[in-house]
Image (cartoon, rainbow, N blue to C red):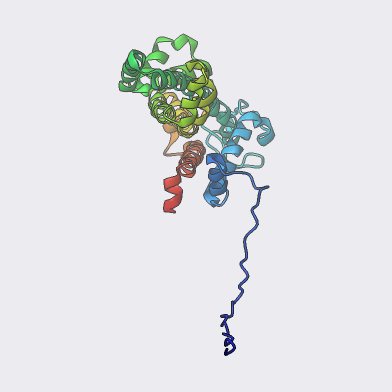
Amino acid sequence: MPEPTSSSHYVAPVETQSITVDAVRVAEKPSNLWRDAWRDLRRRPLFWFSAVLAVLFVLVALFPSVFAQVNPRDCDLTFSNDGPADGHPLGFTFQGCDIYARVIWGAQTSLAVGIIATLLSAVIGLIMGSLAGFYGGWLDSLLSRVGDIFFAIPYILAAVVVMTVFHEYRSVWTLALAIGGFAWASTARVFRAEILRVRQADFVMASQALGQSKFRILVSHVIPNAIAPLLVVSTLSLAASIVAEATLSFLGVGLGSTVMSWGNDISQAQASLRVAPMALIYPSIALTLAVLAFVTLGELIRDALDPKARARR
C-alpha cells in the first residue's frame, strides 16, 4: 500500500502589538459640582481680582483704624474744601473733615447694612422657598402668594416708608431690617425652583423608602444639594443692599447725618459739587468698586456652577 502523503500546514505569522493601558488613579478625589466650579474659577483672572477686592473691602470694614490713623470726626473749618496735604491724601470736605478717613470708616457702615440685610433676606428666602417647594400643595400656594405680594412692593419704597415712620430709631439694624425684610421674595423664588428640581432626585426617593421623615429629608438632603443658587443670589443681593443703603442715605431717609457712610458723604458733598467735586467723587468711587466687586463675584460663581455655561467657554 502506498504510504500516506504528509500534508504541511501553513501557519500565518501573528504580529504582536503592545497595548498601553492607563493606570486608574484611584487616589484622585471624585468630581462634584463644587470641585468643578472651583477648578473653573481659579483659572479666571477676573475672579481673583474681584475676590481680592471684595476681601479688601471686608477687611477695611472690620479694621478701619488699621487703614486710616486720622480720626474722621476731627474736623476743622480752616481746611474747608482744601486739597491733598501731608497725612491727608484725598483732601478735606466742606466741614474740614479728612475725606480718606471718612471713606475708610464709611465702608464699615455701608457693608454692615449690606451684610445684615443680605443675611436676613437669605434666611427668609430659604425658609419660604424650601417649605413651598418641598411640601407643595396648599402650603406652596399660600407661601407663593405671600411672596408675590412682597415681590410687587419695591423694597426701596418700602424701606423709605419704614425709615420715615421709625425716624426716631434710625440705626444700622433698623435700615438693614427695612431693606432685608422686603427684599427676600426674589431669593425665595429662586430657591423654590431649585428645591422643586432637587426633590425629584433618586436619593430623595431612597430616603423616603428608608422611612425618613419629610422634614429630615428636607434638612439633611434637599437643602444642602440646593444651596448653590442661594449663594449666588446672596452675593448679588449684597451689592444691591449696599446700593440701597447709599440711595436711602442720599435721599435723607436712611441713616442719620451723624453716621458715617458713603451715602451720607455723597449727600453732604453735593452742596459743594462745583467748588470741591472730589469730596463727592471719592466716596462714589469706593461705592462703585465695592458694588462691582460683589456683582462680578456673583456672576462668576453663577457661571462656574452652571455646567452648560462652562461648556460654552
Compared to residue 313, the image places residue 130 above or below, namely above
The image quadrant that residue 54 belongs to is: top right
How many numbered discs, if any?
A: 0
Q: Nearer the viewer, residue 226 or 258?
A: 226
Residue positioned 52% across, 26% down in the render: 221
Where is residue 187 shown, x and y percent of the image? 42, 26
Q: Nearer the viewer, residue 174 or 85?
A: 174
Q: Nearer the viewer, residue 159 or 267?
A: 159
Where is residue 133 shown, x and y percent of the image? 39, 22
Where is residue 110 shown, x and y percent of the image? 52, 28
Residue 182 appears in view = yes
Residue positioned 53% across, 48% down in the render: 40
Compared to residue 7, the image places residue 244 above or below, namely above
Q: Quick one: which residue is furthest to the front in this view?
A: 1
Where is residue 14 shown, x and y percent of the image? 59, 77
Task: For the C terminus, give its image quadrant.
Answer: bottom left
